[in-house]
Image: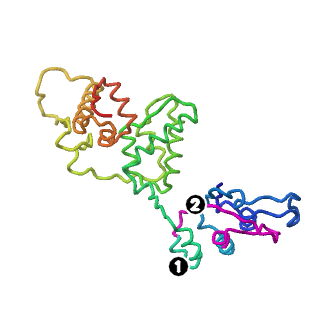
Amino acid sequence: VSLNVAAIPDNLIEAEFFGVAPGAYTGASNKGRKGKLELANGGTLFLDEIGDMPLELQSKLLRALQEKEFEPLGSNKVRKVDIRIVAATSRNLPKMVENGEFRADLYYRLNAMPIHLPPLRERQADIDLIAERLLDELCIRLQLPVKYLTPDAINLLFQHTWPGNVRELQNLLERAVIMAEENNEIDAQLIQSLLINSVQVAQIPSTQNPVTGLPSSMAPPVITHLSKNAQPQTKAPPQPLHQQMAQTERQAIEAALAYTQGHKVKTAKLLGISRASLYEKMRKLEIQYSETC
């Protein structure tokens, strides 16, 4: 059983927790109504945004947790409960306790096994994996073909600060999936247009190749710009641009696969792309490397 504390008005939250006795107040049902504590009896009650709980209700919840009993609103009959509480909040509860905004005894009663989930901006290495999972879920829900992010698009996701956390990433990807229409690729131009806040461009470490992002020791050679007076090294005509780009991309992927001994997950992370993108590029470029999954 779950309850979002922040979504319940203060004048109704006690009834949501403890239930209402028959005819407890004007307009109340003659049959009464069970509260979340009673509904979760013998199981788990998840309280989202526990930091928004009114102080007057905190003492009643504490008693229910300690004594394993409560009284429904408008009733003198005590009801026994045996529940496990899992609570979550985006607020700083220790600071709220210090300011007198949250009861210290309830905080320590709930804080038996705390789990800190860092915000997305502190989990940059996970962004591509999270984005890949979200894309798969969105495509299934919207009944669209599988889509994947280009390397440049993923780099933009890495560089964004994500003040809206995972919800912001999910909303951005949903808009991108819809706007991409029948295209399987979601490119950097589309992602850039959807980012609300300015992208903070991170400087590439000097140990990495500025084009591929691979370690310099394994990166393929990069074609530099020629000056007007520079003479070509060969008289053979240059290949079409798309062929040159495909060749460079192939070299980068093959070098990364060799570096990771064929480990696909590590290769995708090294290249800054999702695993799905890596498989798709290997298929298009006909790269065979199956030593390690």
* Membership of 88 in magenta stretch: yes
Query: In the image, is 261 to the left or to the right of 233?
Result: right
Above or below — where is 147 with respect to 55?
above
Label 1 crowd (10 A; few <14 / some 14-19 / many >=20)? few
Sequence-first disc among 1 and 2:
2
Residue at 23%, 23% (x, y): give it. Answer: 239
- The amino acid type of the residue labelled 1 equals Glu
Provide the secondary structure element on which disc 1 rests: helix
> Which x, y percent locates residue 188?
40, 40
Q: Quadrant of residue 7?
A: bottom right
Residue under label 2, please give it.
86
Closest to the camera, between mark 1 and mark 2, is 2
Task: Report whether residue 98 is seen.
Answer: yes
Looking at the image, do the residues carrying marks 1 and 2 touch, with CB atoms under 8 Å apart? no
Q: CA distance from mark 1 to mark 2?
A: 22 Å
Q: Nearer the viewer, residue 101 or 163?
A: 101
Specify start and end residues of the magenta stretch as a single range.
63-92
